Image (cartoon, rainbow, N blue to C red):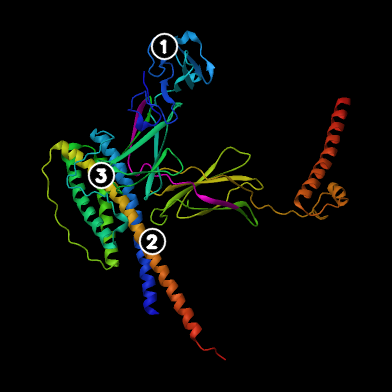
Amino acid sequence: MNFYCKCSNLCSLPPSLSSSSGVRIQYERIGSDVTMQCGTLGSDASITWKVNGSDVDTSVLEGPNLILRNVTLSYNGLYSCFEDSSGDLQDQISLRIGSPPREPVVTCRSNTYPKGFYCTWYLPFPTYIPNDFELTALQNTKEIECQRDAVHKNKCHLKFYQMFSSLKYKVTVTAKNALGKSSATITFDEFSIVKPDPPEKVTAKPIPDNPRRLEVAWQTPSSWPEPDTFPLKFFLRYRPLILDKWQHVELSDTNSHTITDACTGKEYIIQVAAKDNDIGTWSDWSVPIHATPWMEELKPPTNENQPPLITTTTSSSSVPPQSPSYQVSATTRNSATTIPRTVSLLLGITIFLFI
Amino acid sequence: MATNCRDGLSVTSRQELFSKAIQQARKLHKDAKQLQQAYLEKQGLSMNLNPDVTYGIPTAATSHWSELTDAERLNSGLTAYRTFRSLLEEVLDEQRNNLNTEDLEFHQAISSVITQVEAVIEVIEQAMLSLDLPIPCHSDRKLENLSLFERKLRGYKVLLELSNWALRSVRDFSHLNKKRKEAAHLLRSSIARSTRRTSRADPPRN
């Protein structure tokens, strides 16, 4: 059985030491059998245990000791023991059930190449009790200082000790808690972790009089520090909203592209990714944007270019020359043309049957 | 005015030269990397091999790359590629005579990389001339007495460092190009400013 104090730097202190509030903290593993001692009372002392103010089942007592078997998270609580003769509070133990940490999952990435990189980590399984993490980074034998992120507690910023080096970096993250510790090490070279942030401010505009074109523009991610010396290339993908298949274009030395094969009148979804021209991997996709190629603002049909049947239908209409209204008149026209065809077909079938 | 025009032209031609150097170094980086993989496979070496031994191979690693002067950049590149040329010739000889005697395609791939290294040497020399930098003389490399296995390892290390150096050269020339562009921009701005000042100082014509 292990006794630990709350803070990791107090863990080597004897278990009888109390925290400032007089409550001892006792960490125990899930599934273990737990013995809680009531202060320094002898085995013949008669005492009562309470958990969170409620009585504890007397069957779990062994003299003044409280025995809990196969503990689960539901056993967490504040346990208090009282001397029966005086009713005085003798001891208070905060029982915290948890697990030792498993190997953390570590990822390192440089989105600010060549300035530096960062490493993040997480535990694949919860421990239910507080954890501490330590990171050590080496390039060959040279130790590299790690600057903890001000916001994200599981993130650390590092500088490249050298550039263009074939010596690998070795990053070890050790997770510790009151019940144990575990560590994971990853090894990588400078070039493999370079992954820029996605391009920013992606825009797509229709081009007047070009029903199949869209002008797409974007900006280099603002986190990328030296785009002139460390240029990025880009990957553009686009598809009509109603289709699943993407079309792709890879581009260098430019922050814009004209899509020339868009489907007329279709709304498109467009995204861009970035990668260092020579090393590393592609960024995530930028936030999707939507755009529709230019569409002709259709005028109401005139008498000269309409079939005689429709002339009657639309000439009686007073719809303004705007595209949504035009669609209405087009529907009318379609239904007008469909009805006579259906009538002719029915007539044909009837004649055929009579024959 | 004539001086400014000449400066402008030379800036443009330097930019073209640097762009050419970037393309050549980029191709060399890619090909050296491919050759490095092929070398590992053909010599039966581990994929995670990273020999600490240096064998006098120029290392591209630097902790103060951004602070280098133009002359330091180009000089160190030139010295490195001259050494790589000599080392690659030895690697090719080792392959032809001892390690991989039958694989003509592989020999050809090494020869092609040597040719590319020579092209990069030439373009660096041109860049140095265009920047009025002195071209250092070539000093002969000391030949080392290595076992067959050590030569095998050295061959890999040569290709590993060559691909890193080629990448460094891409960055070096991009950096030089950026500096020239900035200089050209400054020059154009100062010409525009002085032209505006002159036209403001001209008396109005009646």
Q: What residue type is labelled 3?
A: Leu
Rendered image quadrant of residue B71: bottom left
Protein chain holding label 2: B
Q: What stretch is highlighted in magenta?
A: A180-204
The correct choice, above or below, for A341 with respect to B197 in the image is: above
Instruction: Decide if residue A342 is on the left or right side of residue B165.
Output: right
Farthest residue to the bottom: give it: B206
Q: Name the residue under label 1.
A: A45
Q: Name the residue under label 2.
A: B178
What residue lies at 63% left-to-right and 46% top-to-bottom?
A263
Q: Can residue A123 be seen in this view?
A: yes
> In front: A103, or A62?
A62
What residue lies at 12% left-to-right and 41% top-to-bottom?
B146
The correct choice, above or below, for A336 with respect to A123 in the image is: below
Q: Mark 3 points at which residue?
A: B159
Q: Disc 3 on helix, strand or loop?
A: helix
Q: Position of residue A323 (x, y in %)?
A: 75, 51
Q: Distance between the residues labelled 3 and 1?
A: 78 Å
> In front: A50, or A204?
A50
Q: Distance between the residues labelled 3 and 2?
A: 28 Å
Q: Distance between the residues labelled 1 and 2?
A: 84 Å
Task: Tell me the mark number nearer the camera, choosing from 1 and 2.
Answer: 1
Instruction: Decide if residue B150 is on the left or right side of residue B49.
Output: left
